């Protein structure tokens, strides 16, 4: 089988595509022919050794894949060859096939193609986990999404809209704001040139109820100040690089809540809870309540280029590798 290999933590240029022997099936395992593998911001951090999870090297990056079951191992029931599935593998996804426990498979609705399926688990589960498990949003509430043109930002817009919220999208370029508007954002803010706090307050009529922040850096404090009394600020990540320092008196004096969101870490602590999140996600897609956009497809050989574009924040939306 063909795989992307990260030989050691360091520059993404060190990644290569190689052919290795396919793993054998053990008890309770299945083989999946990978039709598409989602590429995420965190994949590039892991390959560079800049993330809290550091797998033994060499390793195959990639955490989410979609494809078709081609073989089932001993003891597997309820899964047939030919079943269309998506699976969160942790590592090993940038490959032409994967061998995974049968219990980790999620069936793909007929309405969902492989490329969309491969690109949605991490971003949409993060958004759904944030807005239904770490906090809640009521119909009519205002949600301010930072980094709104990225994968998590677009998913957060879609999920918030499905839950009945009104969304303000904030991003760095016209292209990213256009993608956010197409996803359903009611208003946009170009936060590199506009006053984020002032504009968010103006649009929402006094302040937003929830902030979704996967960006960090200089935009976090004005977003916090744009939050109304009893508002919730959800810390998801620091895509811009710097980890912000925020004045906690603004949390105290307005009875605001700051919430940490680490969906990836939570999946290891509560795998059954995560399966419920994924099941809810698939149900919402099948019902037509969510509308994941088509990602841009690239060959395995472009893994380093795609991850570099995500890290540099040059790419809008989602990308997948197609073996």
Image (tube, rainbow, N blue to C red):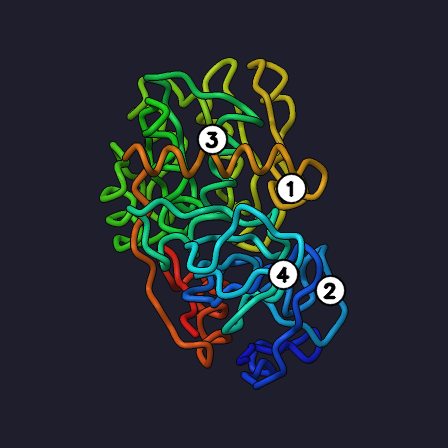
Residue 260 appears in which quarter of the rendering? top right
Q: Secondary structure at mark 4?
A: loop
- Residue 163 position (above or below residue 183): above
Label 2 or label 4, whichever comes before in sequence order: 2
- Of labels 1 and 4, the one closer to you: 4
**Residue sitting at x 55%, y 14%:** 254
- Local packing at callout 1 (Cα closer than 10 Å; few below 14, some 14-19, many 20+) is some
Tag 4 near tag 3, CB within 8 Å? no
- Of labels 3 and 1, the one closer to you: 1
Residue 28 appears in which quarter of the rendering? bottom right
- Of labels 4 and 3, the one closer to you: 4
Q: Secondary structure at mark 3?
A: strand
Q: Which label was assigned to residue 19?
A: none
- Local packing at callout 2 (Cα closer than 10 Å; few below 14, some 14-19, many 20+) is some
**Residue sitting at x 43%, y 54%:** 83
Label 3 or label 1, whichever comes before in sequence order: 3
Residue 242: x and y, percent? 60, 52
Q: Which label was assigned to residue 73?
A: 4
- Residue 319 position (above or below residue 58): above
Q: Which label was assigned to residue 211?
A: 3
Choose between 206 and 171: the one closer to the eye.
171
Residue 263: x and y, percent? 60, 41
- Of labels 2 and 4, the one closer to you: 4
Tag 1 near tag 4, CB within 8 Å? no
Which residue is under mark 2?
A: 55
- CA separation, marks 1 and 4? 25 Å
**Residue sitting at x 67%, y 62%:** 50
Label 2 or label 3, whichever comes before in sequence order: 2
Which residue is under mark 1?
A: 267
- Local packing at callout 4 (Cα closer than 10 Å; few below 14, some 14-19, many 20+) is some
């Amino acid at each position: 089988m063909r795989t992307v290999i990260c030989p050691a933590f360091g520059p993404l240029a060190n990644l290569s595509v190689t052919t290795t022997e396919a793993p054998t099936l053990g008890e309770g395992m299945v083989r999946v022919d990978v039709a598409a593998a989602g590429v995420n911001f965190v994949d590039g951090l892991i390959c560079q050794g800049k993330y809290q999870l550091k797998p033994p090297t060499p390793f195959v990056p990639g955490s989410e894949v979609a494809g078709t079951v081609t073989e089932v191992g001993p003891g597997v029931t309820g899964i047939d060859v030919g079943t269309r599935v998506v699976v969160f593998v942790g590592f090993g996804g940038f490959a032409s096939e994967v061998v995974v426990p049968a219990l980790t498979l999620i069936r793909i609705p007929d309405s969902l193609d492989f490329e969309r399926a491969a690109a949605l688990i991490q971003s949409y589960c993060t958004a759904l986990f944030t807005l239904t498990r770490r906090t809640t949003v009521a119909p009519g509430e205002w949600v301010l999404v930072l980094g709104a043109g990225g994968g998590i930002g677009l998913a957060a817009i879609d999920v918030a809209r499905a839950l009945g919220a009104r969304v303000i999208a904030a991003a760095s370029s016209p292209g990213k704001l256009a993608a956010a508007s197409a996803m359903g954002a009611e208003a946009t803010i170009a936060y590199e040139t506009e006053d984020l706090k002032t504009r968010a307050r103006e649009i929402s009529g006094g302040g937003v109820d929830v902030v979704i922040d996967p960006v960090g850096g200089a935009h976090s404090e004005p977003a916090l100040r744009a939050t109304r009394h009893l508002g919730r600020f959800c810390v998801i990540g620091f895509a811009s690089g710097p980890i912000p320092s925020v004045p906690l008196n603004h949390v105290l004096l307005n009875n605001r809540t700051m919430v940490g969101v680490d969906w990836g870490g939570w999946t290891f602590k509560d795998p059954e809870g995560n399966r419920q999140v994924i099941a809810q996600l698939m149900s919402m897609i099948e019902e037509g309540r969510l509308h994941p956009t088509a990602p841009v497809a690239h060959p395995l050989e472009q893994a380093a280029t795609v991850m570099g574009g995500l890290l540099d924040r040059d790419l809008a939306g989602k990308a997948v590798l197609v073996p």
